[in-house]
Image: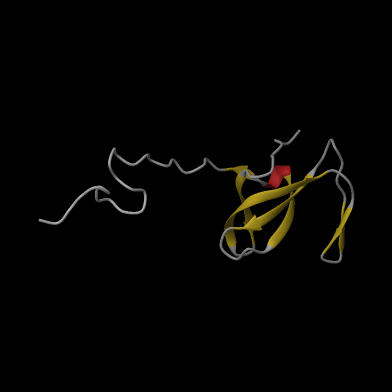
Amino acid sequence: MARTFKRGDHVSWNSEAGRVRGVVLKKVVSDLNFKGYMHHASRSEPQYLIRSDRTEHIAIHKGEALTLLRSPVRSKPKKGQSRLNAEPSHRQDD
């Protein structure tokens, strides 16, 4: 059985243009007519609607075609620093 994914998971898959990354929008568990094609899905073999990070196009894929990506690690700003810039927010020019 292929891995299951949930909404918001960051995944990648192989396409004609190479490796693509995107975000899972929805888990599909019943047959769906998408872009003129019937995609067969069930609870035991779901498919996933995914939005590409680069092009924002929507695709549908089986779980076995997807690879879960680690979420980027966000570092916390140091005390006194804003997230928008590296300078302390309380700094005054002399």
Q: Is residue 72 left or right of residue 28?
A: left
- Quarter placement of the C terminus: bottom left
- Residue 52 in percent (x, y) is at 62, 59
**Closer to the camera in the image, 12 or 30:** 30
Q: Is residue 92 left or right of residue 79?
A: left
Q: Please tell me which residue is depicted at 44% across the width and 40% down the height of the picture.
A: 73
Q: Is residue 87 left or right of residue 37?
A: left
- Residue 45 in percent (x, y) is at 82, 40
Please tell me in which quadrant of the rendered image residue 63 appears. Answer: top right
Here the colouring is: secondary structure
**Closer to the camera in the image, 56 or 68:** 56
Q: Please tell me which residue is depicted at 29% across the width and 37% down the height of the picture.
A: 79
Q: Please tell me which residue is depicted at 14% across the width and 56% down the height of the picture.
A: 93
- Report the number of numbered marks: 0
- Quarter placement of the N terminus: top right
**Closer to the camera in the image, 76 or 15:** 76
- Residue 61 in percent (x, y) is at 74, 51
Q: Please tell me which residue is depicted at 66% across the width and 46% down the height of the picture.
A: 66
Please tell me in which quadrant of the rendered image residue 27 appears. Answer: top right
Name, please, the residue furthest toward the left. Answer: 94
- Residue 67 in percent (x, y) is at 61, 43
